[in-house]
Image (spheres, helix red, strand yellow):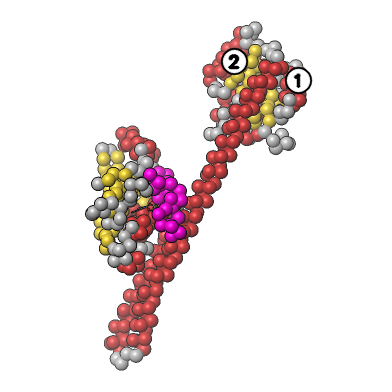
Amino acid sequence: MTDASPRFLVVAPVGRDGELICSLLRSSGYAAECLTTIRSVERLDSSMLLGLILTDEALAQDGFEALRIILEAQPVWSDLPILLLTSGSNIPQYAALASQVRLEFRNVFLLERPIRKELLLSAVQVAYNSRLRQLEIRDAVARQFQSDEALRNTEKLAMAGQLAATMAHEVNNPLEALTNLLFLVENSTNVDEARNYGRLAAQELARISEIVNQTLRFHRAPGKPAITDVAELASSALSLFRGKLRNRKVAEVVKVQPAFAYCSAGEVRQALVNLIGNALDAMPEGGKLHLRVSAVQRQDFHYVRVTVGDTGSGIRREVRPNLFTQFFTTKGSRGTGLGLWLTRDIVLRNGGRLRYRTRTSQPSGTVFTMYLPSLPPFEMTRSASAPARRSAADSTATAHVA
Ligand code: ADP
Ligand code: MG
């Protein structure tokens, strides 16, 4: 095909039927092309097809399998309309073929030959409209996918900005200490005293190096799912907030045990940073941040449970329905409103689920709990995979007011 617009393909190998149908379609404003075999349709892109118009001679010649291959290779959005022109009532072999096609495939119109022009054109019009709708849905899904991708990048950028500010702040403290210590070394009166200041300076340098390494590790974390120690991920996510925790007078209550999940480390770390960041934002006047990671087994299903809890304000009832909606924020220009939307997306993509509990009356606070599967899906036993699947399905977060 040279022309790039979608068209009907007509496969009618006997006599002049193909040509006649094509010219009828073209004269009614439809793009159409005549082919001699069903197999030659295989190499064409689904986006280029409006529908297949076949005669039963074409089907008898190429076999049912050729059609099945074409239909099974369709992308998910596609349900190609097929118009089968059949002489079934006169030829039993064709009648059998036609009923097999009708039973096996979904979007089939059987049209008895000889067929009136008007009837053929009205079937073509129905097929055309249903195919246009499929193409529209395909485009809408692609647009949605692109805008979701753009939003993920927006949140990543916002987070990168926050991390850069956090890192500058974190590095600044030991740098100041270093400057003071070097001044003291310079003015020391004896070697022992200078050595002591030198040792302290080396410790401050080690702190800077650790902060830099943590930040680099954050950005280099692999994106592909693999068996990952979530305890390590959680600790490194928390370490990015050390400065903020100190400034806000927020105490950490950390209980993490090594616990291995099958997940994308980079994504899960981002989800954890979102949850910890939100917990801190909820405690401007100080409080306690709880971080727990443990391996849990329920029946045969092994998973890692991560909880991020705060003693902040809690989430007001009227806010809860919108928590996971894109752009919903109560933080004005400081918030993106993408953190929880992205966090839930990440948890679901990694086969887990996300829950929260919150309470606005005293003692107020919020706990987000993330469950991640411990094993890759193909290693789950039959009995283990059932709860895993259920967990992904009912993963909409629910508010349990404690
Ligand atoms: P953002 O943090 O940019 O506002 P999020 O999607 O991360 O966006 O959060 C959406 C909203 O959910 C926040 O603006 C806040 O109102 C609420 N929220 C999330 N986590 C907590 C929490 N731990 N405590 C109180 N409110 C929270
Ligand atoms: Mg947030």
Q: Quadrant of the N terminus?
A: top right
Q: Earlier in the sequence, mark 2 or mark 1?
A: 1
Amino acid under disc 2: Ala
Checking the image for residue 115, the label placed there is none
Say whether residue 86 is left or right of residue 309.
right
Residue at the bottom extreme of this rendering: 189
Residue 191 belongs to magenta span: no
Residue under pointer 2: 98
Residue 345 belongs to magenta span: yes
- Alpha-carbon span between mark 2 and mark 1: 22 Å
Query: Is 354 above or below relative to 385?
Result: below
Residue under pointer 1: 20
Q: Is mark 2 within 8 Å of ligand 1?
A: no
- Residue 230 screen position, x and y as percent: 34, 53
Amino acid under disc 1: Leu
Label 1 secondary element: helix
Residue in the picture at 76% in, 18% down: 16
Residue 18 in view: no
- Residue 294 screen position, x and y as percent: 27, 50
- Residue density around tag 2, few if under 14, some if 14–19, many if 20 or more, within 10 Å: many
Residue at the front extreme of this rendering: 318
- Residue 74 screen position, x and y as percent: 57, 32
Residue 138 in view: yes
**Front-most of 378 and 149?**
149
Residue in the picture at 46% in, 51% down: 327
Magenta residues?
320-349
Label 2 secondary element: helix
Q: Nearer the viewer, mark 2 or mark 1?
A: 1
